[in-house]
Image (tube, rainbow, N blue to C red):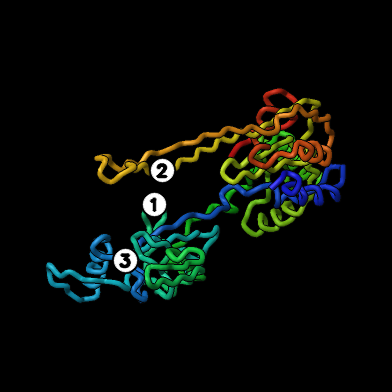
Amino acid sequence: MRIASFFSLMLALVAFMPASSQADRIRDLVDIQGVRENSLIGYGLVVGLDGSGDQTMQTPFTTQTLTNMLSQLGITVPAGTNMQLKNVAAVMVTAKLPAFGRTGQAIDVVVSSMGNAKSLRGGTLLMTPLKGVDNQVYALAQGNVLVGGAGAAAGGSSVQVNQLAGGRITNGAVIERELPSTFGASNLIMLQLKQDDFSMAQRVSDAINRSGLGGSAAPVDSRTIQVIAPRGNSSQVRFLADVQNIDVNIGVQDAKVIVNSRTGSVVMNREVTLQSCAIAQGNLSVTINQQNVVSQPDTPLAGGQTVVTPQTEISLQQGGGALQRVNASANLNNVVRALNSLGATPMELMSILQAMQSAGCLRAKLEII
């Protein structure tokens, strides 16, 4: 795939972008300090599988867990019993405890196999306590596991679509313990920018002060804005509802080029510019071909032996490499056209961009993820 098709969608979007700076709402730029989710985790069993559960000889913890659960239900398994289970799988259960989650509120859970179960499709998660980082139980999970994949196997052949070793239970857990909250206890609210930027922190602070909502804001650093708000839960809810809808002129952002080395994706924002430079990019390919040649004696009674001799052929080919001029570009449209003129693939473009930044002709921060 050539870089021209890679950037075709980007060109279509940029063509309709206004040249001036745009305005975003504060709710899209900041998070409220202390208002966040908390991770929960638990260990449990999924039963009711159609012969696709854990192989207990290789996952003894599944048998041990089932034995402990049965003992709590008043059933004693004789010592030394070798249970051959096919319909049970040991799983890890994860969930997110939302901010201001209340007792009795239902939340979604994700169920993931931790043994060698072939599939969790059709299984039921037994009651599983979900704990927080403080080892306290905050929710109980139970329900039928919904698996988004499907698969079949017969005669040594198999077909599988998506993942079968994990699933989800919508509203599969009920909150049993609430987290203590200090919201409304203080008249100070800390807003945290999703991306640290000194100019953006100042713009958000100025927008809040000009709004006339009665609060005052001041930037603390490149990510945090301190806001003085009315005291009390109801008053702060009303205040934050109004603050989050304030429009902020985000101005000119930092020029960035993001390169994903694993997928070959290259994304650049509208502030990227180029300086004039010359680029030579060549493709070097090495082909190694090995064949086995059988050498036999001329006559059966000559006393010779049949010998297999490997023959290896190596060819080296280098294409392209012509020096091409890239003109200076003042906007993203011209940048894309200049890079298209190189005829490079996305994988080649990553090396070109690194070299251009080192040469000082790429006016952007290059980030490799």
Q: Secondary structure at mark 1?
A: loop
Q: Nearer the viewer, residue 215 or 83?
A: 83
Disc on res. 292: 2
Q: Position of residue 338 (x, y in %)?
A: 80, 36
Mark 1 → mark 2, Cα distance in angstroms: 65 Å
Which of the 4 image quadrants contains residue 278?
A: top right
Q: Secondary structure at mark 3?
A: loop
Disc 2 marks a residue whose amino acid type is: Asn
Mark 3 → mark 1, Cα distance in angstroms: 30 Å
Q: Nearer the viewer, residue 217 or 305?
A: 305
Q: Residues within 10 Å of mark 3 (few under 14, many from 20)?
A: many
Q: Nearer the viewer, residue 60 or 265?
A: 265
Disc 3 marks a residue whose amino acid type is: Asp
Can you say which quadrant of the picture contains the C terminus?
A: top right
| Residue at image coords 41%, 43% | 292
| Residue at image coords 44%, 72% | 152
Residues at discs 3 and 2 in contact (Cβ within 8 Å):
no
Q: Residues within 10 Å of mark 1 (few under 14, many from 20)?
A: few
Of the residues under marks 3 and 2, which one precedes in the sequence? 3
Which callout, 3 or 1, points to the residue nearer the camera?
3
Q: Position of residue 316 (x, y in %)?
A: 58, 32
230 w.r.t. 221: above or below: below
Task: From the image, tell me which residue sits under label 3.
Answer: 54
Of the residues under marks 3 and 1, which one precedes in the sequence? 3
- Disc tally is 3
Disc 1 marks a residue whose amino acid type is: Asp
Disc on res. 134: 1
Disc on res. 336: none
Of the residues under marks 1 and 2, which one precedes in the sequence? 1
Q: Position of residue 273 (x, y in %)?
A: 79, 33
